[in-house]
Amino acid sequence: MTSSQLFEQIKLKRSFLCIGLDTDINKIPEFLLTKDDPIFEFNKGIIDATAEYAVAYKPNLAFYERYGAAGWNSLQKTVKYIRTKYPDIFTIADAKRGDIANTSAMYAKTFFSVLDFHAATISPYMGHDSTMPFLAYEGKWAIVLALTSNNSFSDFQMLDCGNSGKKLFEEVIEKSMHWGSDANMMYVVGATRHEHIKKVREIVPDHFLLVPGVGEQGGNLADVVRNGMNSKCGLLVNSARGIIYADNSMRFAGAAKTAALKLQTEMEALLKEASII
């Protein structure tokens, strides 16, 4: 999927909502546990209920890998379902991989050739050769961790880098942005770091930013938009728990739809305010 195609979906749906499919079998409705594949059935219900509002889905692989082969099967079925029924929706493997080149090449093949995701999240700690294999696939994206929303982000990301006066996250972005382009690279920037999103946008004015942390983690959508939106939106704002676990009864899908619609409505207003739609 190209940047232009993604932007068209944003305008069409009046939304830049990414829904995290962080599916925990201990939190899904009890009646689904009688199904052959409860995780997939839950995901399917969420996807069908929210697809009109979401431009992207982001399964976090840890929630699938923990179940071994069965979880991997649920993940494959989920991605295939999205790619078949909703082919215009962007799919992200939230994998946070990053290893030596030949190992990264195998990860890239897994996510892009086998599972057919559009994008994968990448840890840039090992540098250029750990990321380049993900950029070798036409129409696929590497989403590089830049400034995360977890509590201990400052352990490394906010370290001063010598006499440059820059923080480590700034150096990471400035270095890595030359590995690819705004046509095949995005950056993860946590919504809870809205005071730094403006700096990120100054460094990469045209790249998409994947922004987790809105909702349950305390990030504010209006702050993210004020500091991070560009003329083509340039944002994919992720919400997981606030949507997929809005209800744990037989009405879970309807509750997810209501929660997704609420965010989409807020996003539509912000897109109009920015004269994007």
Image (spheres, helix red, strand yellow):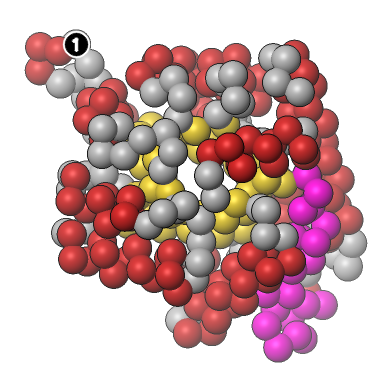
Q: Quadrant of the rendered structure where residue 158 is?
A: top left
The residue shown at (85%, 65%) is: 249
Image spot of residue 165 (x, y percent): 19, 11
The answer to whether residue 49 is above or below residue 142 is below
Q: Position of residue 30 (x, y in %)?
A: 78, 74
The reply to whether residue 35 is visible in this rendering is: yes
Residue 34 sits in quarter:
bottom right
Q: Give yes or no for residue 44 being in the magenta stretch.
A: yes
* Residue at point 27%, 57% (across, down): 133
Residue 25: percent from left, percent from top: 64, 71
Q: Residue at point 67% right, 64% down?
A: 82
Residue situated in front as seen by the camera: 114 or 195: 114
Residue 224 or residue 175, whichever sits in front: 175
- The span shown in magenta is 31-53
Q: Position of residue 128 (x, y in %)?
A: 19, 45
**Left or right: where 118 falls relative to 154:** right
> What amino acid is found at the position of numbered circle 1 in the picture?
Gly
Decide which of 59, 204 is in the foreground and name it: 204
Q: Secondary structure at mark 1?
A: loop
Q: Nearer the viewer, residue 181 or 71?
A: 181
Magenta stretch, main secondary structure, is helix
119 over 202 or under it: above or below: below
Image height of 32 relative to 180, above or below:
below
Q: Quadrant of the C terminus?
A: top right
Q: Is residue 227 magenta?
A: no
Q: How many marks?
A: 1
Quarter of the figure with residue 196:
top left
Q: Residues within 10 Å of mark 1 (few under 14, many from 20)?
A: few
205 with respect to 270 (left or right): left
Residue 157 in sight in this render: no
140 vs 173, left or right, is: right
Q: Which residue is mark 1?
A: 165
